[in-house]
Image (cartoon, coloured by chain):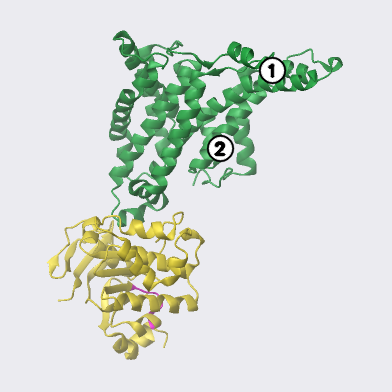
Chain colours: A yellow, B green
Amino acid sequence: MAYLEGNNLVASYGVVPILHECSVGVEKGELAVIVGPNGAGKSTVMRVLLGMLEATSGSVTLDGKDISMLSTQDRINHGLAFVPQTKNVFPSMTVEENLEMGGFIREDDINKTIDEVYELFPILHEKRKQLAMQLSGGQRQQVAFGRAMMTKPSVMLLDEPTAGVSPIVMDEIFSNILDVKKAGMAVLMVEQNAQQALNIADKGYVLVSGRNEHTGTGRDLINDPIVRKKFLGG
Amino acid sequence: MSESIDIINAFALLTNFVILPALSYGSQLALGALAVTLVYSILRFSNFAQGDSMAFGTMLTIIISGYMISRGWTITGVPTALLAIPMALIGMSIYLLTMDRLVYRYYRKIKAKQNIIGITASIGVMFVTGGIVRFVLGASAQRFGDGERFIFSVREFKAFTGLEQGIALKTSQFLTITVAILLVSFLFYFLQRTKTGKAMRAYSDNTELALLSGIDPDKVVRITWLLVALFTTIAGTLYGLDKGFAPQQYHLLLLPIFASVIVGGIGSPIGAIAGAFLVAFSEILLTYAYKKFLIYLLPLSMHPNSLVQLIGTEYKYAISFVILVIVLIIKPTGLFKGKVLDE
């Protein structure tokens, strides 16, 4: 059983069914990637794992414990962290305030964690007094990661972290993600750039219409001729 | 020599009848405008009940200070209303939190995000609040200031300086300006430096992410109403000490307050303050009769016969409207880059 696991998730928006018995999982120190065409339910899986959308059936477990009934709030207290695709920073607050807000629920001293984030992303230290909205796209993404890391999470969920950025920034963001993984967290991300994402992934899930179509290591999926043909453009 | 005295006299006149009144009126508007800004930033609607809430807060002050005076709980020289504010504040907080519970919370729950729904609800609250105030205190005007009326009067000023024109500093003006400075400093300190204040800014900035960060929305809303109670009660009481209390007058204050908020930039606290002073100074500068002022400055042959009043005082609310229209045409985001309405 994986550290964070979603088992046979079924979910719908109103009457529109989105997920049909979909399962994903990720271990600590591992990067798992969910890819698939538009409307496959990739982001929905993430919303269900976070408790932002209620699953009609199936379960979510963290470290073997069932957390399906917990609120988003409580799941975050239990070690989940989430970086949304858009609007993932507080634009009119400084970099440092963004990090402080990330650590809002913590009662202990958060300064050490802030320093750790600065160590991981040195540019943020330099710009700590600047407003998040004044930063470049890549830097803002670092603020978003940093904010999520402030709760010292064991699992990091990323929703399309490279959506709408240039290829150079994309490489920068992927290398940031590998840094986050190296810090010992379980990282699960949803990605549009399937080829690049599977390249760095330990595990990959290909979702189609809310079902697990292919599952395997990143390398296996890239080398699978069917996956290549259907999802990676030959 | 006499000419330079004339200039000094002219400016003493202006200080007494324009600058001091505008500074205190501006401060009162600023406090009201900050309350509107807080509600707008956190609860996301324009609070039409602001003027009548100020009347409600003032009503509480009047009742409590009346009781205190009847029991002899007064301090010589200090308006009893000032001593009554802490108690009134508690009552106001309870009233606003109750209104939130009864009215606004429902619309938050069903996730009605549009400003217009909040506005409509707050118009309802406005009528109820105004009704309660008129029911309890009646609709007629009254004064409730006691204690020393002046810090220094025109006569004292004249005797001291030997000038023909005097400047009086009313206790209410002095209190208004001092208290406004203190309150505004407190608000900025709170929002910029405290964890709770930052959480409120975060909630206003990106609500979804604030929730993901573990910020408790109910607490943010509660604290917002407490701050609104603070600003509303004090703004209302200071306005009443300065100009007397009349429910209709308070109701109409909504116009210059909204004008201040929009002129300054919706959602920007600094903008609300700047807007308030802009509106206050425009109102008073445009309705002041400059005859005497010009007599001091101009040679005899050019002395005006008329009052030289640009706009009659009965039109003072129109000034807020005109400023609003000009700003919305030229710079819809306001002076301090706020949000555009109807977002």
In front here: B24 or B115? B24
Left or right: A29 in relation to B264: left
Left or right: B342 in relation to B200: right
In percent of width and height, residue B82 lies at 39, 21
| Label 1: how many Cα within 10 Å (few below 14, some 14–19, many 20+) | some
- Residue B274 numbered mark, or none: 2
Left or right: A106 in relation to A97: left
Residue placed at 37% from the left, 73% from the top? A120
Question: Which quarter of the rendering shows the N terminus of chain B?
Answer: top right
In front here: B308 or B258? B308
Q: Quadrant of residue B245?
A: top left
Q: Chain of mark 2?
A: B
The amino acid type found where label 2 is placed reads Ala
Q: Is residue B145 magenta?
A: no
Query: Distance of mark 1 from mark 2, alpha carbons?
Result: 25 Å
User: Could you say whether the residue bearing mark 1 is in a helix, strand or loop?
Assistant: loop
Residue placed at 40% from the left, 45% from the top? B191
The amino acid type found where label 1 is placed reads Ala
Q: Quadrant of residue B14?
A: top right
